Image (cartoon, helix red, strand yellow):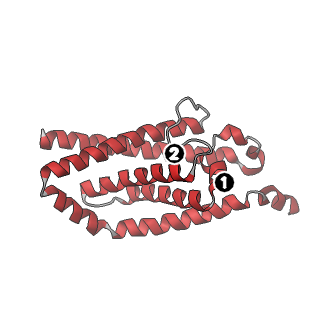
Amino acid sequence: MQSYINRYSHHTKFYITLVVSLLSTSLFIVGLRFLNFLYKFIQSKLQERPHLYLHFIILSLLNNYYQVYAHIFTATKFMGYNHIIPAGSKDNQSIILFTITNILDILGWISVYIIYGFGHWFLILLAAVHFGSGITAILFNNTFQRYYIAEPRKYKFLNDSFGYKYWTWFRIIFVLTDAVSRAYISLMITNDIIIIFF
């Protein structure tokens, strides 16, 4: 029993960050779902001014296409290929840099909710996880840098005691799910604006 405690005790902060992240994510999911009426309202107001609506959609697409790029290369970084590392995925980055990139990430999803007039639960879940990670980065920056964003090979010593490779695979799957979802939706929106506006 003591050996089991010793095995996991030095990862205590990580488990605390998981709880904080899950609670933050849950609260954000509730908030984003509750705001469905607001997405519809903003959408209707934008549609009254087609040129403004078109500019809003183009900005949303530019942001989301960048996020597709960023998430793909974040995944390759987690796989150990660090030739291209987007802003927000770098090791030992400042809280300010991560917060700014994370806000742009979340705004990308919120702009999609506005374009469609509602937030689908799965897309809200993706945005909410980013919010949970952002809260974790602010409250537990060192732990966040070590477990959430760092290259896996920097912490190979964790593999035996922590199962770090499974956590790394979770990170890879999450960012690729985000990238594929954004790419699909962004292509649909691009197709729609070409048909509607051009």
Residue extending farthest top = 83
Q: Which mark is residue 88?
A: 2
What residue sits 63% from the left and 61% below the top?
17
Q: Could you tell me which residue is drawn at 48 percent across and 55 percent down?
A: 130
Mark 1 = which residue? 142
**Residue at image location 77% in from the left, 58% down from the top:** 8
| Drawn side of residue 10 relative to residue 182, left or right | right
Q: Amino acid at mark 2?
A: Gly
Q: Is residue 43 left or right of residue 24?
A: left
Q: From mark 1 to mark 2, how far is it between C-alphas?
A: 15 Å
Mark 1 Cα within 10 Å, few/some/many (few <14, many 20+)? some
Q: Quadrant of residue 117?
A: bottom left
User: Is label 2 in a helix, a strand or a loop?
Assistant: loop
Dot 1 or dot 2: first in sequence order is 2
Nearer to the camera, 89 or 8:
89
Looking at numbered disc 1 in the image, what kind of residue is underneath it? Asn
Compared with residue 14, is residue 66 higher up or lower down, i.e. above or below?
above
Residue 120 lies, with reference to residue 158, above or below; the image says below
As rendered, which of 171 and 38 lies closer to the eye? Answer: 38
Residue 49 % position (x, y):
13, 55
Expressed as whole percent of the image width and height from the top left, the position of residue 115 reads 25, 54
Quadrant in which the C terminus is drawn: top left
Percent position of residue 68, x then y: 41, 40
Up the image or down, 148 lies above or below 14; here it is above
Q: Which mark is residue 80?
A: none
Left or right relative to 165: residue 197 = left
Q: Is residue 91 above or below residue 82?
A: below
State the residue lying farthest toward the right: 2
Q: Secondary structure at mark 1?
A: helix
Q: Is residue 147 left or right of residue 83?
A: right
